[in-house]
Image (cartoon, rainbow, N blue to C red):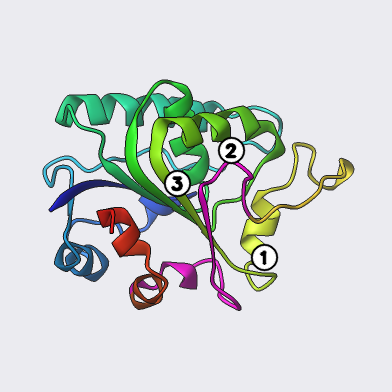
Amino acid sequence: MKDIVLVTGTWGTKEANNWHNISSPWVKQMEQEGLQKLTNEEPFYWSSNLDGWFGDNYDWKAAGYALKWYIKAHTNKPPCIFGHSHALQVIAEAAKAGAIFDNVVTVAGPVRDGMAGAYEQLCLQSKNWMQVYSDEVDYIQWLGSMRPGLFLTPWKFKRYSKWSHIKNYIPSTSHSNLLDFNTLKVYGVFKFLRGE
């Protein structure tokens, strides 16, 4: 069994029946795929507040440092990481802070212009990084990728970072449905995490 840390996206820790909770059906299926949470006693939580709209990324940066120290407190080996939506920013900030990862999967992560340096570090600090994304059906990813200042500043929307090692496109799938366990399994996400 490979150790894995699950990182939720914006508002994810505020939902009682979230996919990443220890007793969720999603986690039970993940364990059947040969992946186990780094620790069941103390899962990784961050504020999961919406961040980055006005140019600061304080919650993401703080969560990145917290993720780095959470890993150091529980293991001396780089774990696998799986994150949804703005967990991409948290994981990238952790890499920027010096965390080292095994295989990383980010699902429907909004790609932010101001995070390019952190994405580069994520590429360098992980064994392999897979980005899972969809098309215009995932309008949440589009909204989450906006530059600070909302609609006042033009930006070029990107579904994936040039720094990720593998781009895994799943067509016509919404932001939350990209977390569907069976869909991820069909598209090879869990084999990738196991290093197969």
Can see residue 17? no
Q: Mark 2, mark 1: which one is toward the viewer? A: 1
Residue under pointer 2: 51
Percent position (x, y) of residue 160?
62, 52
Q: Is label 1 in contact with label 3 (beta carbons under 8 Å)?
A: no
- What type is the residue that disc 3 sits on? Trp
- Please give the label number shown on residue 129: 3
Write down the quadrant of residue 26 in the picture.
Answer: bottom left
Residue kind at label 1, given as amino acid type: Tyr
Determine the CA span between mark 2 and mark 1: 18 Å
| Left or right: 124 as drawn, with respect to 27 | right
Callout 2–callout 3 Cβ contact below 8 Å: no
Q: Is 48 rendered above or below residue 107?
A: above
Label 2 crowd bin: few (<14), some (14–19), many (20+), radius 10 Å: some
Question: Looking at the image, is mark 1 or mark 3 earlier in the sequence?
Answer: 3
Of callouts 2 and 1, the N-terminal one: 2
Q: Secondary structure at mark 2?
A: loop
Name the residue located 58 percent from the left edge and 38 percent from the top edge. 51
x then y, percent, for residue 40: 13, 47
Q: Residue 128 bears which disc, if any? A: none
Instruction: Identify the residue at image location x=20%, y=66%.
Output: 33
Is 125 on the left-hand or right-hand side of 138?
left
Decide: few, some or many residues near mark 3? Use Cα within 10 Å; few <14, some 14-19, many ≥20.
many
> In terms of sequence position, does the residue under pointer 2 or pointer 3 come before the other?
2
Q: Is residue 185 left or right of residue 1?
A: right
Q: Main secondary structure of the magenta part?
A: loop
Give the numbered dot on residue 139: 1
What residue sits 61% from the left and 27% below the top?
117
Residue 39 on the magenta segment: no
User: Between marks 1 and 3, how big is the CA–CA gap?
Assistant: 23 Å
In magenta, the rendered stretch is: 160-181
